[in-house]
Image (tube, helix red, strand yellow):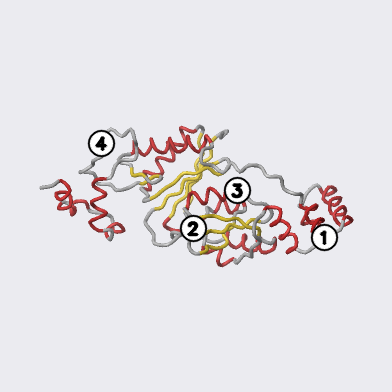
């Protein structure tokens, strides 16, 4: 009897998880013959007796905890070396006051008055001081920020942002001010920021979710209202991990993968931390349900 036919005849012994059952015989056949993603795996590419079809880490299935650890160590090394990160090249941005002056939205006297107040207070953004002195309104400041960052200015709908909480860890919304705004055509996720964009966060969300991410400026009052409300909504479960070295971080993250046994997972760097996103079950839409995702945020002492 041909080997593949014999394997399919034995499919009842596999006992797949309920969420895998609907995939049918084609999935079971591929599961029998799948190659371990670890290029140094010593068990061979054919695993006719294996009982696990997960975890999947960065598009590759691993046949054992040792192989998972190998892949996670490689991913941590890649992330810390800067490969595949945003590394946005510095672009000179016209100072906000000068930009607004050139547009004719403020006068030279209004700009000098706001700058003097800012220097005296030692705090606050220039746009806020211009608004306090009634030189411009909030919408004008938002338009100027959009020109400064070469991005659109979008309104925020708190209810819509709440519905997108599965896209971004709560920590990133809180610490980096990255507010999910809307999902366009199931493919493009818009992130809103109050005063300045964060390309590193936008790229990390794009890599972790597989969606194209675009950034936008949101008028201050709208941003703060939506931001405050979204922080009170439900986000994916998150675990915070502290590690003393890259090797310790990789070992801890590999254990998280083996514990969760995700059907998909990816590791990306966000500023001075590593973000591991774990998808627990397959989902039909562009974004999974909140309960279908786990996030692990790992910080490393003196991350390079």
Q: Which residue is most to the front?
A: 102
Above or below 17: residue 42? above
Along the horizontal axis of the image, is 236 left or right of 218? left
Q: Earlier in the sequence, mark 1 or mark 3?
A: 1
**Residue that carries the numbered disc 1 in the rendered image:** 104
Question: On residue 166, which mark appears?
Answer: 2
**Residue that carries the numbered disc 3 in the rendered image:** 199
Q: Earlier in the sequence, mark 4 or mark 3?
A: 4
Q: Which numbered disc, 2 or 4, marks the residue closer to the eye?
A: 4
Question: Is the Cβ of the residue at disc 1 closer than 8 Å to that at disc 3?
Answer: no
Q: Residues within 10 Å of mark 1 (few under 14, many from 20)?
A: few
Q: Residues within 10 Å of mark 3 (few under 14, many from 20)?
A: some
Give 53 or 213, whichever is nearer the viewer. 213
Along the horizontal axis of the image, is 26 left or right of 270? left
Give 56 or 212, whichever is nearer the viewer. 212
Mark 1 → mark 3, Cα distance in angstroms: 29 Å
Q: Earlier in the sequence, mark 2 or mark 4?
A: 4
Q: Earlier in the sequence, mark 3 or mark 2?
A: 2
Mark 1 → mark 4, Cα distance in angstroms: 70 Å
| On-image quarter of the C terminus | top right
At mark 4, the secondary structure is loop
Tell me the residue at 58%/46% (across/down): 200
Tell me the residue at 28%/32% (across/down): 42
Tell me the residue at 56%/51% (across/down): 202
Image position, residue 83 (x, y; %): 51, 38
Mark 3 → mark 2, Cα distance in angstroms: 19 Å
At mark 3, the secondary structure is helix
Question: On residue 44, which mark appears?
Answer: 4
């Amino acid at each position: 009897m041909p080997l593949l036919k014999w394997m399919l005849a034995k499919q009842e012994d596999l006992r797949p998880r309920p969420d895998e059952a609907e995939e049918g015989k084609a999935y079971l056949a591929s599961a029998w013959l799948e190659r371990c993603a670890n290029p140094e795996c010593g068990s061979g590419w054919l695993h006719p007796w294996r009982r696990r079809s997960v975890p999947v880490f960065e598009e590759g299935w691993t046949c054992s905890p040792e192989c998972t650890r190998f892949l996670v160590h490689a991913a941590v090394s890649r992330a810390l070396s800067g490969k595949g990160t945003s590394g946005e090249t510095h672009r000179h941005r016209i100072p906000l006051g000068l930009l607004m002056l050139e547009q004719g939205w403020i006068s030279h006297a209004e700009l000098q008055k706001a700058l003097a107040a800012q220097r005296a207070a030692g705090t606050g953004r220039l746009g806020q001081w211009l608004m306090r002195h009634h030189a411009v309104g909030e919408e004008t400041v938002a338009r100027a920020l959009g020109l400064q960052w070469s991005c659109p200015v979008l309104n925020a709908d708190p209810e819509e942002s709440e519905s997108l909480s599965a896209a971004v860890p709560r920590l990133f919304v809180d610490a980096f001010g990255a507010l999910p705004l809307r999902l366009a055509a199931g493919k493009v996720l818009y992130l809103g920021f109050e005063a300045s964009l964060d390309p590193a966060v936008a790229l990390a969300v794009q890599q972790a979710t597989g969606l194209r991410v675009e950034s936008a400026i949101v008028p201050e009052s709208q941003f703060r209202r939506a931001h405050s409300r979204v922080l009170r909504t439900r986000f994916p479960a998150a675990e915070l991990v502290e590690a003393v070295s890259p090797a310790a971080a990789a070992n801890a993250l590999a254990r998280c993968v083996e514990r969760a046994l995700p059907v998909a997972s990816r590791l990306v760097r966000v500023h001075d931390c590593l973000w591991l996103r774990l998808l627990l079950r397959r989902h039909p839409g562009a974004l999974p349900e909140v309960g279908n995702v786990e996030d692990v945020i790992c910080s490393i002492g003196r991350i390079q």
